[in-house]
Image (spheres, rainbow, N blue to C red):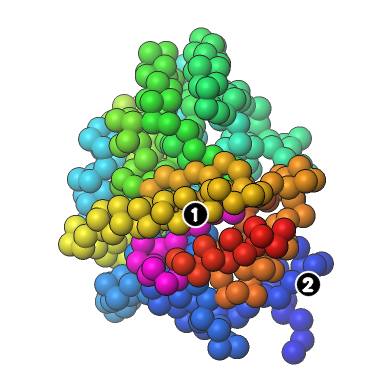
């Protein structure tokens, strides 16, 4: 076969690692062209919540394709978007009254940042600085990278990334330092703080407690600094509750959702905003409108898939399924935890992670990662370690046998290293 012209994301083609061809998927299983059944241990990069090809989501997509494929969303609307916006405002925290559509997590973050900056600009305040947490990840566009961790991922672009104020990650016992840094930074009238609530995903599945999130929210409120919650990864039950913010009793000013919004079936994102944010843009003056759109804003087929996701949350015992998976993950994690070479076992909701002790120091480019990747690939398991951090974040429908196979493979990798 000739070489594929495809340039894959986060892939070093110079390493010539095999790239499996997937033909179909169901539940927590992926099926490859060479006849393998692969367990999807990371929900296809954190998007698949109820399992692949959930019949209701697939049916909703099929049904919508017979009616309306795509329509400009500036000055026009359609039923799937109207239903979805009402459905979202009904289940999301009260006071997040307005729904802005886009098409990826990164874009939902760009929209959130622009909303925050527009809010201050329209109020005539020169507030531009964004506060962020160390090790955060908010996406790969220039604005999203600017508010994320700097490192090998974005070194070529750093001269163009905008300057932010960075708070230390609240490690156990040092939470006060984070809160004090936030309090100090808030005195300089920044525009907003953006955070991943309770878990920093791409930063290495770093977990911090709800009370810290609650305190951060309170400090922002006290200083009139906008609070942006990026729940692109944590939303839709990942951390045990619909939103991670719920566990801290936190209501943000702006909320970003994507990944599980359509159950992971098709791209869609929303940025929810409080009335204050919306009203700052509301005026007879066209110069104050929110200047943002993408071609596929609120694509009707994607909205139909998201409506099916909301129906699944309404009609199926999703919360119970998540609690059950959380317990099953915790049991298996407890068996890994005492193994030699394992550090920082941690879990929250459906996410479980450990660090493997790397004599060379670890980090995203840890040489353990490619070896682990090959080990899991040979065992028909989709796990994609973040450097020396191995985590399991499966679809909520995963069975015990598949979960055992994943943890057995991890235990084997630990003893082999
Ligand atoms: C994945 C992710 C994003 C980016 O979402 P994309 O759809 O990949 O652009 C943003 N924020 C967080 C917290 C994420 O995990």
338 on left or right of 83:
right
Secondary structure found at label 1 = helix
The C terminus lies in quadrant: bottom right
What x and y, as percent, mark residue 224?
Answer: 40, 16
What x and y, as percent, mark residue 237?
Answer: 34, 51
What x and y, as percent, mark residue 381?
Answer: 56, 70
Residue 46 in sight here: no
The N terminus lies in quadrant: bottom right
Residue located at (71% from left, 75% from top): 18
Residue located at (65% from left, 31% from top): 162
**Label for residue 335?**
1
Q: Name the residue under label 2.
A: 16
Q: Alpha-carbon neighbours of circle 1 within 10 Å: few (<14), some, or many (≥20)?
A: few
The magenta region covers 389-402
Of 398 and 10, nearer the camera is 398
Q: Does the magenta stretch include residue 396?
A: yes
What x and y, as percent, mark residue 122?
Answer: 42, 24
Is ligand 1 less than 8 Å from the beta carbon at label 2?
Answer: no
Question: Do the CB atoms of the residues marked 1 and 2 lie less than 8 Å apart?
Answer: no
Residue located at (41% from left, 54% from top): 331
């Amino acid at each position: 076969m000739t070489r594929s012209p495809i340039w894959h994301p986060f892939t070093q083609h110079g390493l010539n690692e095999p790239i499996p061809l997937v033909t179909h998927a169901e539940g927590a299983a992926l099926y490859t062209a060479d006849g393998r059944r692969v367990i999807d241990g990371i929900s296809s990069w954190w998007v698949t919540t109820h399992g692949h090809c959930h019949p209701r989501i697939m049916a909703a997509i099929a049904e919508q394709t017979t009616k309306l494929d795509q329509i400009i969303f500036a000055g026009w609307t359609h039923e799937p978007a109207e239903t979805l916006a009402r459905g979202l405002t009904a289940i999301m925290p009260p006071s997040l009254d307005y729904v802005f559509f886009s098409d990826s997590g990164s874009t939902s973050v760009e929209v959130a940042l622009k909303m925050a900056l527009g809010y201050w600009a329209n109020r005539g305040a020169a507030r531009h600085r964004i506060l962020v947490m160390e090790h955060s990840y908010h996406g790969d566009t220039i604005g999203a990278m600017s508010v994320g961790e700097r490192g090998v991922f974005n070194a070529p672009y750093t001269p163009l990334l905008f300057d932010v104020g960075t708070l230390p990650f609240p490690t156990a016992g040092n939470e006060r330092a984070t809160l004090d840094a936030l309090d100090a930074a808030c005195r300089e009238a920044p525009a907003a703080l953006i955070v991943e609530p309770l878990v920093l995903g791409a930063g290495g599945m770093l977990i911090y407690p709800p009370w810290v999130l609650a305190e951060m929210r309170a400090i922002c409120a006290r200083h009139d600094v906008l609070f942006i919650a990026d729940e692109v990864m944590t939303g839709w039950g990942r951390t045990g509750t619909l939103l991670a913010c719920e566990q801290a009793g936190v209501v943000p000013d702006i909320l970003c959702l994507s990944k599980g919004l359509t159950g992971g079936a098709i791209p869609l994102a929303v940025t929810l905003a409080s009335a204050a944010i919306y009203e700052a843009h509301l005026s007879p003056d066209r110069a104050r409108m929110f200047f943002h759109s993408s071609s596929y804003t609120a694509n009707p087929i994607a909205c139909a898939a998201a409506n099916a996701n909301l129906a699944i949350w309404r009609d199926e015992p999703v919360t119970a399924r998540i609690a059950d998976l959380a317990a099953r993950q915790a049991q298996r994690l407890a068996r890994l935890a005492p193994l030699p070479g394992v550090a920082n076992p941690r879990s929250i909701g459906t996410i479980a992670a450990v660090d493997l002790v790397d004599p060379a120091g670890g980090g995203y480019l840890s040489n353990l990662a490619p070896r682990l990747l090959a080990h899991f690939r040979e065992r028909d398991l989709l796990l994609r370690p973040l450097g020396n951090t191995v985590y399991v974040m499966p679809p909520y429908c995963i069975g015990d046998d598949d979960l055992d196979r994943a943890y057995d493979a991890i235990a084997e990798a630990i003893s082999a290293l």
